[in-house]
């Protein structure tokens, strides 16, 4: 099944805000409020950062926020910090009751 | 906090069957969806499939013909079998638990290499 579309890389200086986009279709993002975002540091397992489009699990910094409009979901990291440098993946629930990942975005803190 | 641990052979021969088990501790295997995800070296994540504690399952359509995911609630374990593997199946395999829409708890991952 085809993946959701993410930019390969996004960067920004410390303290600034960046946004990572995730583009889907009417089979996933458009019609479902089940978009999640995961952070993965090198050699580590992914960590859930956002679920249900815009909800943060307990313990996740409020500098991370999520939103959705039409076929695009977004992850915004405000007050960028060195520890935020990682790969970020979006997922969405799909109409065939499966999950689909985005290709991943490397976030670099300049 | 639920913890997950993958186990199984790190080396599988081409055309044979890959078998992995995930052991769940610190919580019940009931009332959760149990997933397998993989990540080829240097590449992105791919969802493989899930099984519910009742035994119902669903798979990635692109892999479905080669997959079986099963669950043993008495052992708090669930398993993955992938048949007819090739070098393209070389990856870190993760198990993860969630509500069917999110992957809340992850194992540390295990590297499986397919050799010719």
Image (tube, coloured by chain):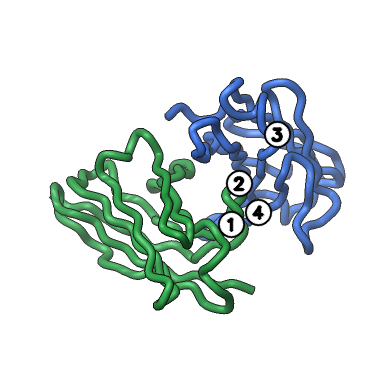
Mark 3 lies on a secondary structure that is strand
Reading the image, the residue beneath label 3 is A20
Residue B54 seen in this snapshot? yes
Q: Residue at x 39, y 55 (%)?
A: B92
Q: Are marks 3 and 2 on the same chain?
A: no
Q: Which residue is mark 4?
A: A48
Pointer 4 and pointer 2 on the same chain: no
Residue B12 image point, x, y percent:
20, 58
Mark 1: few/some/many CA within 10 Å (<14, 14-19, 20+):
some
Task: Please state if B27 lies on the left or on the right of B91 as rendered.
Answer: right
Is A92 on the left-hand or right-hand side of B108? right
Q: Quarter of the image holding residue B112? A: bottom left
Circles 4 and 2, Cβ within 8 Å, touching? The answer is: no
Q: Do callouts 1 and 2 mark residues in contact (Cβ within 8 Å)?
A: yes
Q: Which chain is green?
A: B
Q: Which mark is residue B101?
A: 2
Q: Residue at x 59, y 29 (%)?
A: A28
Is A26 above or below relative to B62? Answer: above
Q: Are marks 1 and 4 on the same chain?
A: no
The letter of the blue chain is A
Output the chain of dot 4: A
Vertical order, B90 against B4 (above or below): above
- Is label 3 or label 4 in front? 4
Q: Are marks 1 and 4 in contact (CB under 8 Å)?
A: no
């Amino acid at each position: 099944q085809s993946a959701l579309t993410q930019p390969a890389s996004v960067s920004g200086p410390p303290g600034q805000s960046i946004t990572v986009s995730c583009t889907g279709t009417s089979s996933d993002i458009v019609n479902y409020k089940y978009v999640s975002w995961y952070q993965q540091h090198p050699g580590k397992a992914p960590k859930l950062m956002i679920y249900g489009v815009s909800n943060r699990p307990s313990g996740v910094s409020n500098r991370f926020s999520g939103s959705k409009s039409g076929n695009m979901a977004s992850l915004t990291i405000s007050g960028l910090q060195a520890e935020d440098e990682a790969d970020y993946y979006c997922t969405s629930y799909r109409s065939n009751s499966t999950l689909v990942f985005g290709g991943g975005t490397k976030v670099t803190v300049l | 906090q639920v913890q997950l641990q993958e186990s199984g052979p790190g080396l599988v021969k081409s055309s044979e069957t890959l078998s992995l088990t995930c052991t769940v501790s610190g919580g019940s295997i009931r009332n959760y969806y149990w997933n397998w995800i993989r990540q080829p070296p240097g590449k992105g994540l791919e969802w493989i499939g899930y099984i519910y504690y009742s035994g119902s399952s669903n798979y990635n359509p692109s892999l479905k013909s080669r997959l079986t995911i099963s669950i043993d609630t008495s052992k708090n374990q669930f398993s993955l079998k992938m048949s007819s593997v090739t070098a393209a199946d070389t990856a870190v395999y993760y198990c993860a638990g969630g509500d069917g829409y999110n992957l809340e708890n992850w194992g540390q991952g295990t590297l499986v290499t397919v050799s010719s």
